[in-house]
Amino acid sequence: MEAVQKGTTAVGVRGKDQIVIGVEKKSTAKLQDPRTIRKIHQLDESICLSFAGLTADARVLINRARVECQSYRLTLEDAPSVEYIARFVAGIQQRYTQRPGVRPFGISLLICGFDAAGQPQLYQTDPSGTYSAWKATATGKQAKNVREFLEKKYDDGVADPVKLTITALLEVVESGSKNIEVAVMTRGETLRILSEAEVAEHVAQIEADKAAEEERAGRPQAS
């Protein structure tokens, strides 16, 4: 759990017909290719995940989950459900807590996608091997603060899950849009990663709305 708590923040928000995953990106070295440092990964046509914790551990579980998705399709000729993959990954994490000579996986995963009925699903797993469904959640450092923020702002059928996700990340990300990555899954469409320009536009709008709200709050009421 300590590795998870030191990991960069990841946020998941379930909307009416969208699921949004937002992550805090680590600053890359000047000569490093940022495309090789990814925290949002697609597992299947309608399932993706993000994580907080040890990247090497995440790579192992991501590869296992991808193989399981393909095996499920080959065997049953159908797409795996989000719950099935969350249970599969959690099972692997749990087995590594009781085997001699191995250590637990130092990651927490946010797994999201759409079920057969087209309903958005969001699951979280932790190093102990437990998994649970969420409407909105966060993992990584300061996850408690972000989750408390989401509890105050989230409502069923949230109109703009992208805005809520970015706003939640801005609670803990100091450098603004430069260190934020956002992926959007919409019913009937493929996973889409927002460009840096799109994220910057959302951040600018959020900051403008916040400034306007503070101005209205500080303005004396007319008698």
Image (cartoon, grey):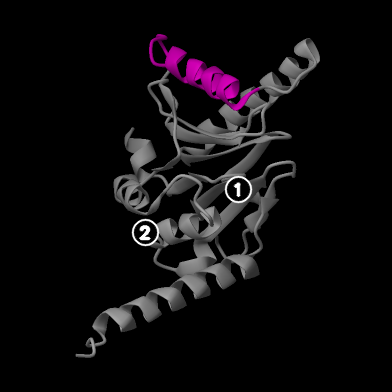
Q: Viewer-proximal residue, 76 or 91?
A: 76
The disc label shown at residue 98, or none: none
Residue 67 image point, x, y percent: 70, 22
- Tell me which segment is drawn in magenta: 81-101
Residue 84 image point, x, y percent: 59, 19
Q: How many marks?
A: 2
Can residue 26 be seen here?
Answer: no
In the rendered image, which residue does mark 2 sit on?
172
For marks 2 and 1 on the same chain, the one whose residue lies earlier in the sequence: 1
Lateral position of residue 152 relative to residue 68, left or right: left
Amino acid type of disc 1?
Answer: Arg
Q: Residue at x 48, y 20 (%)?
A: 90
Q: Is residue 92 magenta?
A: yes
In the rendered image, which residue does mark 1 sit on?
38
Residue 109 image point, x, y percent: 49, 34
Secondary structure of the residue carrying tag 2 is loop
Secondary structure of the residue carrying tag 1 is loop
Q: Is residue 38 magenta?
A: no
Instruction: Look at the magenta stretch and give its main secondary structure.
Output: helix
Question: Which corner quadrant of the image does residue 125 belong to?
Answer: top left
